[in-house]
Amino acid sequence: MVNENSSEKKTLLLGGFSSILSLLGITLFFSGWIYRWAYFSYFSLDVNVQTYTAQSFLIVPIQIYLGSAGSLLKTILVLLALPLLISLSRRFLNGLQISWIRSLQARLALPSVGLKDRRQFTASLRDELVIVAWVLIAIFWLCKHQGLADARRDAVDSSSTLPVVSLLLPQSDGVLAKDLRLLEDNGEPIPDPPLRGHALIGDLNLARDLRGTSLSDGKGQRVWRVLAQEPTGWLFLIRTLPSTAAANERPTVLAIPNAKQGQVLILSPQSPEVSS
């Protein structure tokens, strides 16, 4: 009997521990996905086309909740506010006599189940739904806010954590780039390369603007940085914004396919200072 009771206790303990780990894993994955969705949506990119492993989504929440003093403070405030919000919501619902609750109780009316048990089940279900709803709302708000804040930080040159890039392309692939043979450090205008053999679909002014700003301008805080690099060959670059940019302004994003074929990618934490 003693061995049987001990075995049952161990089974219950392991079952409870597994349930906690499962809930924790779901919460972390949901947090990481919402964060990356908000981050890339700022740059008008879809997180679903990014090739991230499932394990990486479990690491991102560490940055969301504990990455800085501000993030930690927001996490603590939300954790303190959750019990109050849940309690107020439960009291509010308890004070309502909603028809759908009565209908649910009627549908659950089984001969073998008493009225008291049906009421307890309905109240328990309602309380669990309230708890789950507020937890999801809190996670969504925290992760979305942090994702957008980090995206804005990386979009502004003075605060960006993204590496500065120098990308050398084959001339056939660099129609919007500048021909190295035409580049001279003499302050003279740089002629545009010929566009023979190429066609355009979409906004002509956007292509013209990119051709005119394909080189980084450190003084103007318009620097090209790497946003993401995919194993499939796609390379995403952004042209950063100056610190004076409006809050609703978004950086230009350039997607380059086959980034591993015939190209040279040079990365740097910041734009190097060139001595005169």
Image (cartoon, helix red, strand yellow):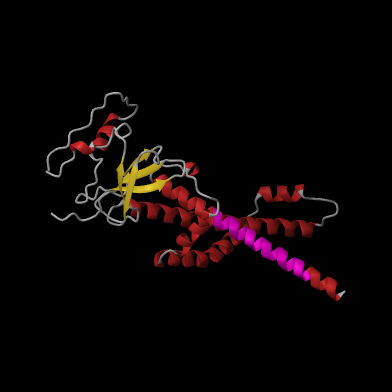
x and y, in percent, of residue 199 in the image: 32, 24
In this view, which residue lies farthest toward the bottom?
2
* Residue under the point 63% across and 55% down: 129
Where residue 35 appears, x then y in whole percent?
47, 53
Residue at screen point 37% across, 39% down? 255
Above/below status of 37 relative to 191? below
The overriding secondary structure of the stretch rendered in magenta is helix
Left or right: residue 235 compared with residue 80: left
Q: Horizontal placement of 68 versus 268: left or right?
A: right
In the picture shown, does residue 87 fall above or below 34? below
Q: How many marks?
A: 0
Residue 12 on the magenta segment: yes
Quarter of the picture holding the N terminus: bottom right
Please determine whether, in this image, residue 200 is positioned above or below residue 79. above
Q: Give how far across and how far down residue 163 sits, in percent.
A: 33, 53
Please report the bounds of the magenta region as a residue range. 9-29
Q: Is residue 58 magenta?
A: no
Taking the view exactly as shown, the residue that stands out farthest to the front is 262
Residue 137 visible in rendering: no
The reply, left or right, for residue 73 in relation to residue 86 is: left
The residue at 23%/36% (across/down) is 179
Q: Position of residue 74 (x, y in %)?
A: 44, 64
When asked about the image quadrant of residue 17, the answer is bottom right
Residue nearest the viewer, comparing 255 with 65: 255
Q: Residue furthest right?
A: 1
Q: 264 or 123: nearer the eye?
A: 264
Residue at 48% across / 62% down in the picture? Answer: 62
Report which quarter residue 146 is drawn in: bottom left
Foreground residue among 93 and 190: 190
Residue 11 in view of the camera: yes
Residue closest to the eye, 212 or 24: 212
